[in-house]
Image (spheres, rainbow, N blue to C red):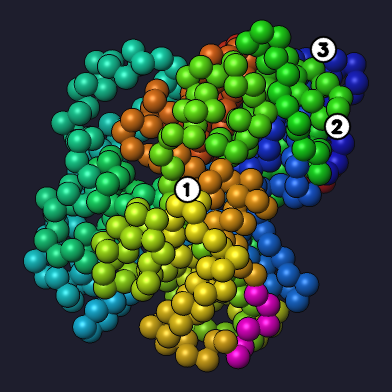
Amino acid sequence: MNAPLSSPSVRRSRPHVAVIGAGPGGLAAAMQLAASGARVTLFEKDGVVGGRTRTLTSPEGYKFDLGPTFFLYPRILEEIFAACGAKLQDEVELIRLDPQYRLIFEGQPNITIDATGDLAQMERNIGSFAPGDVAGIRRFMTDNREKLAVFRPFLERPFLNTTDMVGADILKSLPQLRPHRQVDQDLKRYFKDPRTRLAFSFQTKYLGMSPFKCPSLFTILSFLEYEYGVYHPVGGCGAVSDAMARVAERLGVEIRLDTPVEKVTFAGRRAVGVEVGGQHISADAVVLNGDFAHAVPKLVPNSIRKAWSDQKIEKSRYSCSTFMLYLGIEGTYPELSHHNVLLAEEYQRNIKQIESGELPDVPSLYIQNPCVTDPSLAPPGHAALYMLVPVPNLRHGADWSVEGPRYRDIAIQRLKVLGLHDIESRIRYERMVSPQDWQDEFSVGFGATFNLSHDLMQMLSFRPRNRFNDTQGFYLVGGGTHPGSGLPVIYEGARITSRLIQQDLALTAEPALAPATEA
C-alpha cells in the first residue's frame, strides 16, 4: 500500500487513531476518521485488505469471493464515500441482477422460480405453485417498508447503556416490530405455503440464523432485496474492499499489511495504543475490527472486561458456520443463474440438525456462478463456482480433518439436483474451507462465520458496544458489535463508531481527498 500523503508536521498535530483489521468495518472507519481530520494507521495481519470480504485468486486465474458474494442496499456505502469526498460509482462498477437469484425447492416435484424485483413477475412466479399467497406479496412489501422506516433509526445510532433500550421511541415501535415473534411466524400473516415463506425468510442465513428462531425484525432482509436490488460488483465483492482501501490511502491513511497487532495497550481502562512487533505505538483512540470472539480475548486484558469477560464470551451464543468449496471448472454453465439457492425438502429438519451439532445428511446449499455476469472471474471458457453449505460451528466438536473430505463429496453430489452431473471430471482448481479453517486460518472465533447470534438478548445494548463496554478510547466495528452482521449493517456500524470517535476527539475537518491518480 502507498505511504500516507500528509506531511510529518501535519501528522504530529492531529489525533492518531489505530485501526486493527482491514475488513469492511475497519476500512469504512479508517476512511471516515481520516476524512474528519484524524491521522489513521490501519494494521492488517494478512497480506491483503478485505478480511472475509476479499478475493481469492488461484494460479490458474480463477477468482472467488471468500465470503460475501453480493452487494445489498448500497445507499449506506454511497453516503460513506460521499462523506469522504469520493463516489462509490466512480470506484466500483455495480451491476443490478435480475433475476436476483434462483430458488430451487426440492420435492416431488422440484419447483424452481427466479426471484425478481419486478413484483408483477414475482407474483406470477409465486402463483405458479401457491396461488393463494399472491395477494400477500404487496402487503408484505408495504408493511416492511413501514417496518424499515421504524427500525432504521435504531440501526443508525449507538446503544451505550441499558436505559437506551427503554426509550419512548422504542416502546412506541414495538407493535410494528413485533420482536417477540420469529421470522417464519410473522410471515404466516402473509403466506400460507411454507415454500413461499421460505422464499422470503431463507435470508436469515445471512445472519447465520434460522427463520424459525430469528426475531421477526429481520423480515426486512428479504424486503431490502426486492425493494432496492441485489448487486454484483464487477471483480467480486473484494473489489469493493480494494476501492475502500484506495480512497482511504488518498485521504492519508497508512495501511500496514502483514502487520499483526499483538495487544492493545491500556493505561487503566483507557486505550493508549497498540503493540506491534514488540514496539508500542501510541494512539488517541483504538478501533478493533477483528472477529469479536477471537480477537478480544487475545488483545484486551480480561481484567478490564467485566461486561464481556472471557467467561461471558465463551458462554455467549454464536451463529452457525459454513462449509465452503471454491471450484475452478472447465466449461461454462449458462443454465445456472448467477446466484442459486437449493432448499432441501426437509429444510426445517436441516436447521434442527445444525442447531443440535449434527451435519445435515441432505443439506441445503448456495451456489454462485458469477461468470454468467462477470466473465473476468475465470479464464475464457471456464467458470468459477462458489459453494456454501450451512453447518454447525466448532462448539459441537466435529473433526473436520475427517468430515471435510466426506462432506465435500456430499456437497458435490448435491449439485446433481441442479443438473450438474459431470462436474467432478471438469474441476481444474479446488479449495475447501471448513469451520476449522475459518477459525485457524481466518481467525473466526468458534468458526462461527456470522459472529454472535442475533437473538434479542444479543442485540442493541446487549451486544458488545461500539464504544466498548468498561473502557475508554477503545471502540469496535464489525459484525460483533451493534448493529450486527451483513455488509450494509457493518458499514452502518462503522459510521456509528466513527461518529463516536469524532465526538470524543473533536474531529471536524472536511475531507481532503488526494487525486485518484496519486493512489
> Residue drawn at (24%, 38%), measured in percent from left and top?
146
Q: Which of the marked residues, 1 or 3, is nearer the chain's N terminus? A: 3
Residue situated in front as seen by the camera: 497 or 315: 315
Q: CA distance from mark 1 to mark 3?
A: 47 Å
Callout 2 amino acid: Gly
Q: Which residues are magenta?
A: 425-430
Asked if the magenta segment contains residue 345, the reply would be no
Q: Contact (CB < 8 A) between labels 1 and 3?
A: no
Residue 19 makes an appearance in the image: yes
Q: CA distance from mark 1 to mark 2?
A: 32 Å
What is the quadrant of the C terminus in the image? Answer: top right
Q: Residue 20 vs residue 495: left or right?
A: right
Q: Check the image and report above or below for 55 versus 15.
A: below
Comparing marks 3 and 2, which lies closer to the viewer? 2
Quarter occupied by residue 120: bottom left
Callout 1 amino acid: Arg
Outermost residue toward the top? 268
What residue is disc 2 on?
Answer: 277
> Residue drawn at (39%, 61%), measured in percent from left and top?
358
Please tell me the numbered disc located at residue 395.
Answer: 1
